[in-house]
Each structure stands twice: as structure tokens, then as C-alpha cells.
Image (cartoon, rainbow, N blue to C red):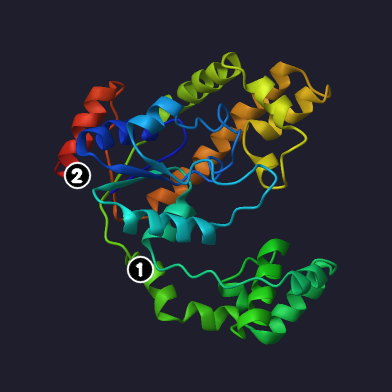
Amino acid sequence: MAIVGPTASGKSALALELADELGAEIVSVDSMQVYRGMNIGTAKPSAADQARVAHHLIDVVEPDEHFTVAETQLLGRAAIAAATGPVIIAGGTGLAMRAIVDPLEFPGRDARVRAELETLELPVLQDRLLTIDGAAGETVDLANPRRVIRALEIYAVTGLNPSRRAATAAAQAVREFEAYLPFQAVGLDPGDRLEARVVARFDAMLQAGLLDEVNGLAEQLGRTAAQAVGYKELLPVVAGDHTIEEGRRAAIAATMAVAANQRTYFRRDPRIDWLEWDDDPDARLDRARQELEI
């Protein structure tokens, strides 16, 4: 089963309670909780919570390492296969969730090819892609250099252009939300109460020592980890370039932007049953039990 929704909606707490009741394990689909040491700012489950319920995809790599969605898929599916009881997938990174339950395919990479492509201007990249696939714009955002480079890299590695990849059976199944691993899913969304929850949670993180955590990790954060919401906005604070209040406001705004994207992503998935919101965590737990027929 899966529990998803925007950040600060109470997914982790609900998953923990259900897992404790069911004797289940939790597979996290939070793209930043995989990094060791990034505890407060990612709302990582505490040591006590992890002792209470087995968690997977937590503290997998160091913050200067790169961790891909393909690795999430591999480790997440392995954890589910090895589990002896129920499994709850919980988190707000929609692509990570779908990578585990749906037949998403992740072609290999070629560092040499990518390095060469990254030296080229976007118009040149676009011309190359359109030369091998005149319809590439139907499946690739041609205004996004990262997407165009990845499409060209995949072509170099596999020989498949975007149109041919989009025509595979797996791609068709992904578009139609046909799962590789059957599951039930519920969604949590506080609606117009979300911003207040985001503000309260971030202020609690600051009180818990988030600024000190960012300061201690500043020299260790790799390219991906440094983009984590909260860390990215507080790095200029620890560098002395911004005030704490400026960093706080920026982090809250960035969190709300992430939440908007999460809502858009998850709401497209017809398999998710959205629970009627209630401020009472016990009421949310009861509604999840009913929806999941527990």
C-alpha cells in the first residue's frame, strides 16, 4: 500500500501508525531522506521510530554522492521482495513512488557522451535531437537542456529515440497507470491548511537545530543534496550572505512551491484515493483504515 501527498501533510506519521498496527515495513519515497546526516531538514524518521518500525531507503548514501531514481527503484523493489509482511510506501516524491510500483525503465548512462553534450548550446542540442526524431517535441521538453541532453544520451546508449521509447509496451503501461506491483494508495492533503502546517514545521525545524545541521553539512553537500529545500535556502545564511529571516521566508516559499508540484503530480494518478482531511490525526488514521480496508 502507499501513502502519498504534499509535504507537511502528515504522511510519515500516518504510515508509522499503520505500520505499527500491521507489523508492516516502510519504504520511504523521499528523495532527500536517502542522505546521511540530513535529518532535521528532511523530517527523517527518528532513531526511535526506525527502531519501532523497519524503514528502507533512509540513510543510504553520503550527502556528496549522487542517488538516482533508478537506484530507488532497485532498492525499493528489493525491500518489498524481501519483506515477510505488509509494506507501506510513504513519501512525497511521486517519481520515486511510480518507479517502484510502475514499469518505468531507466536506460544506462555514458559519462563521456554526457560530458560532450553538456558543452553544446541548447539550439545545437535541439537540432541534434530533431534530426534523429522529428517528433521528439511530443515527448521531450525541448526548452529544457537537461531533458534534451538526457534524450540524446539515451539514444547514444540504446539506439532508441524518444518516439520509439514512447511506443514501448512499458511506456504505454506507465501512461495508462498500469502497475508493475499492484497496490492500494491513499492521499493526504490539508487543503488551505497546508501553508500553516508548512510554517509551523519549518519553525520547529529551526528550533530543533536545522541551522546548525546545515552549517555542519555545508562543505559536504553534493550537487543534488545542496538543492534540498531548506538546506538550499539556509546555505547563504550560514555563509553570512542572508539573514535567518530571509532564509526562513525563502525556505517556506520553496516548500510551498514543492507542495504545489506534488499536488499536481499525485492528482493525475487515478489510483490514489484522497482522504477527507481532518485536523485530528486519529480521525485521519481511522479514515485510512476504512479506505484501505484494514
Q: Secondary structure at mark 2?
A: helix
Residue contact between numbered discs 1 and 2, judged by CB atoms under 8 Å: no
From the image, tell me which residue sits under label 1: 176
Q: Is residue 144 visible?
A: no
Q: Is residue 53 visible?
A: yes
* Residue 5 vertical position relative to residue 97 in the rendered view, above or below: above
- Which residue type does callout 1 highlight? Glu
From the image, tell me which residue sits under label 2: 292
Residue found at x 70% / y 40%: 226
Residue 133 rendering spot, x and y as whole percentages: 64, 84
Name the mark nearer the viewer: 1 or 2.
Answer: 2
Residue found at x 85% / y 67%: 119
Mark 1 or mark 2, which has the lower sequence index?
A: 1
- Which residue type does callout 2 highlight? Leu
Residue found at x 82% / y 26%: 239
Real-space CA distance between mark 1 and mark 2, rounded to the nearest whole angstrom = 22 Å
Q: Is residue 52 left or right of residue 288?
A: right
Q: Is residue 233 left or right of residue 41?
A: right
